Amino acid sequence: MQRLALFDLDNTLVDRAAGFRFWALEFCEAHGLDPSEVQWMIEADGDGLVPKEAFFAQVRDRFLLDDAVAALWAQYRERHPVLIPVCPGVLSGLTQLRQTGWKVGLVTNGFADMQSSTITNSGVSQNVDGWAISEAEGVRKPERRLFEIATERCGTTLTAGGWMIGDSVSADIGGGQAAGLRTIWIDRGRLWPDALSKPDHMVPDAAEAITVLLMQHAY
Ligand SMILES: [Mg+2]
């Protein structure tokens, strides 16, 4: 099997949850809200899965803001990606993978502007061979095509196999399996759903996943 590692971005290579907390704190300060509202915002965001129009409509109602939902969302799109930190050990780990002959790609669902900004600001852009963002390509994980595009940008093809690493059960692991890839699930303290086909490995974070990859193909 070729040395191809495709990674999810949010809550895999970068700590989107920490970035959201930073953003929510800033938002509370800027609007004179009690910092304890950060917890409500984290819950309302649903780990990023709640559509942002719905989220900001709730925010506007709860805090009696004059700002339009579209304006709040626009500010968020620009600011949040800047606040998302890379996960510990990721930059050095990706460097090590590439030094040992791995091609490293990114496969992410999200908005083109936000994901590009996150990739650049976190420093990840310097350490990968290519990426595919769902909005830019018009196709989302778990669909095979997005994995294929990222792989092509790494200069290779999916037919030679490889690995997909991510925190989403369906988008990353289900999608990776369907694309013929071996998989590593970033569990973030969760249990794997019994009914579903298991990933090849389950680890707490990306640094551990990179260690697994390096061991699979040790010289
Ligand atoms: Mg993710």
Image (spheres, rainbow, N blue to C red):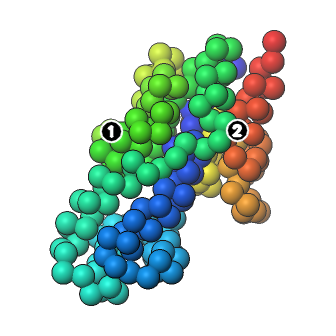
For residue 175, the mark is none
Which SS class for mark 1?
A: helix
Residue 67 percent coordinates (x, y): 19, 75
Residue 153 percent coordinates (x, y): 43, 22
Q: Quadrant of residue 215?
A: top right
Instruction: Identify which residue, 30 or 91, lies in the foreground.
Output: 30
For residue 207, the mark is 2
Please tell me which residue is depicted at 43% across the width and 68% down the height of the picture: 24
Label 1: how many Cα within 10 Å (few below 14, some 14–19, many 20+): few
Relative horizontal placement of residue 198, taking residue 71 as reference (left or right): right
Residue 177 percent coordinates (x, y): 63, 41
> In this rendering, is residue 218 above or below 169?
above
Instruction: Identify which residue, 48 or 92, lies in the foreground.
Output: 92
Q: Which residue is mark 1?
A: 137
Observer able to see residue 211: yes
Please tell me which residue is depicted at 61% across the width and 18% down the height of the picture: 98
Amino acid type at circle 2 is Ala
Q: Which of the marked residues, 2 or 1, is nearer the chain's N terminus?
A: 1
> In this rendering, is residue 139 above or below 170?
above
Relative horizontal placement of residue 51, taking residue 7 as reference (left or right): left
Label 2: how many Cα within 10 Å (few below 14, some 14–19, many 20+): many
Observer able to see residue 54: no
Instruction: Identify which residue, 158 or 213, lies in the foreground.
Output: 213
Residue 128 percent coordinates (x, y): 51, 26
Amino acid type at circle 1 is Glu
Relative horizontal placement of residue 185, taking residue 131 as reference (left or right): right
> In this rendering, is residue 41 above or below 122?
below
Q: Quadrant of the N terminus?
A: top right
Instruction: Identify which residue, 163 or 67, lies in the foreground.
Output: 67
How far is disc 2 from disc 1 in space, using C-alphas?
A: 28 Å
